[in-house]
Amino acid sequence: MANQSQTDVAIPTFDEFPPVSYADWRKAAEKALKGAPFEKRLITKTYENIDLQPIYRQENLEGLPHLGGLPGFAPYVRSTTPLAFVAQSWDVAQEIACGTPAAFNAAVQADLARGQTAINLVLDHPTLHAVDADQANADEVGKGGLSISSVADLAVALAGVDLEATPIYVQADTSALSFTALLAALVQQQGKSLAKLRGAIGMDPLGHLAGHGHLPRDLAGVYDAMAQLTGWAATQAPQIQTITVQGHPYHNGGASTTQELAFALATAVDYLRAMQAHGLSIDDTAPRIRFSLSIGSNFFMEIARLRAARLLWAKIVAAFGGNAKSQKMRVHARTSAWNQTVCDPHVNLLRGTTEAFSAVVGGCDSLHISPFDELVRVPDEFSRRIARNTHVVLREESNLARTVDPAGGSWYVETLTDAVARQTWAIFQEVEKQGGMGEALAAGWPQAQVAATAAQRAANLAKRKDIFVGTNMYPNPKETRLEVPPVDALAIKAERTEALIACRAAADTSKKQAALAQLAQSGRPMDTAIQAALAGATLGEIAQAARTGAQPGPTINAICAQRGAAPFEQLRAAADAFATRVGQRPQVFLATMGPLTQHKGRADFATAFLGVGGFETIYPAGFNSADEAATAALASGAKAVVICSTDATYPELVPPLVQKLKQANPGLMVLLAGYPTDQIDAFKAAGVDDFIHLNANCQALLSTLQQNMGVAQ
């Protein structure tokens, strides 16, 4: 009987639980809020002008047009291939910012043997502008990227690398034609096949214009070079992309994710039209375009943005008449530079990890994860290893490569994907109304949009509504700054100049000059540029010949790259400099009134608040009277005092305490921890200079405090 009864016991199912309506949930949520407004507390307004709901439901998916797609099929929301990372993982394309060819080669050899799968070659400023190293300013040569001036330089930098087996990504900007000539010449010298060369050597003149404010030549001439390079690649190097549309100038200027994406799409459309005007079809051009986007810290927003990007690009290319292959978007992702910090730099490890996670879940094709020290120095072997291994952990230990589109079907992600697509499309259409991205940049519209968003971000960061851990919140007062190895710019310039002297000495001068003369007159610049490179012509010489007769380039108001944490880092740096001059950090005395339970909460808050600006607090036990607190504060020698107690005790404590402090030292700055709204005017009248509280403008208050205390110079 016992066995029989056990067998007959019914197994519970979810059907036994009664369904709960949204109205029921909201009623319970509002009760938990204890009278606080639901919309104000639980609905989040993003910089993308999207209202994030506290909960998403199946009915949110009703009517979303993209849900019927499958991986590998239009509109490619879920992936451009049927198996995505299950069949082929994303390229581990870590940037290597070494300045000289020999240093670059040592790093790339080490990294390719330890998990890197693609070469991501970052060029220094002179190389990006096709200026040979011996003609450039010494402080620019090898700074922030690799200095390349000749085929010989490339041969050193890429020694031991099989270019037929390893993809290479180069953002070459306006030097793309000249740089490609050098690389193609090297491939021929090595007896390799250009047809097997994979990757991108990208031009992005509008991105360059947005970020730098100028172009070295007229846009029509740049588009001529782009058409020549793109047409050449289509027949000679079909696996090389020649146009890389960058969202980074907009992201690094403070743009929202939808602004960055919309401006990138609008830029790509300008390029499609320009190439059509040069006789290239949509199916010649679209597959030659690679998008390069920055990935910020809003995890789900970034996943949705990458999915929406593929949808919108497919829509655009289809409108141009492009075939299914041409509609597939190729995306390189880079973790954000805008939110990296100098203070507490190891937190950059965590930021990079979450950003990389969202990039992979969103379906990027290649990815750079910023080493934690990238901001302050050329990343060393350790930081490169940690960043590189983040890829491996995501792929191997997190099993992200085992499922196609793991975010697919999420009520939140699918709804957000649709919202991002719609907001992006609205911005894109506004650019189109202005005549395209080139015209919009000339008129200053994208710059104004980015500046407005950047101002919103700055205001929220100043009030700590947005948080940088370790910088404007949770500072580490015992932080040890990263060591920055000294850089001998003159020695680097001398090394690079010596290499160029040797290169020019080894060149067949007559063949080189003949090739350059032909290049200046040729209607097929790629073929003649390659011949010039093989004859020993340098990057700058090839560019100069190819630009014969060029008109001056356009100038606009550039979008200035910035970092959100920079204003707070300046406060910290000023305090550090003060400590070096004086021998101790700037000190603020905490007038802790009453027993520990009365003052501790606000004293601790004030200590952390002031720590953001590099201040040190003198934190005594509680005082029993205003006289006792004033005597101790004045004896400490501190140039500022924060009164810490409760709102209930302040009316009795504050006026006499402030009076005693100000009478003894009129220049003393007196702050109050808290913001008792009904007493603000009275306390200001009593002499309180400012208030430390949750909604305070932390950046402005600390800046004022530093100025009054003589910290800032």
Image (cartoon, grey):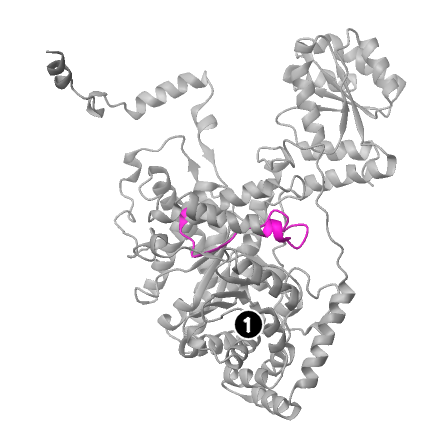
Name above or below for residue 616 compared with residue 86. above
Q: Which residue is mark 1?
A: 176
Direction from residue 597 to residue 358 in the image, left or right = left
* Residue 364 belongs to magenta span: yes
Residue occupying image coordinates x 74% and y 75%: 498
Name the magenta segment's main secondary structure: loop
The residue range painted magenta reads: 361-384
Q: Residue 503 location, x and y as percent?
A: 67, 81
Q: SS class of the residue under badge 1? A: helix
Disc 1 residue type? Answer: Ala
Check the picture and name the quadrant holding the N terminus.
top left
Name above or below for residue 563 compared with residue 533. above
* Residue 320 belongs to magenta span: no
Q: Residue 379 location, x and y as percent?
A: 63, 53
Residue occupying image coordinates x 76% and y 55%: 486
Name above or below for residue 573 compared with residue 691. below
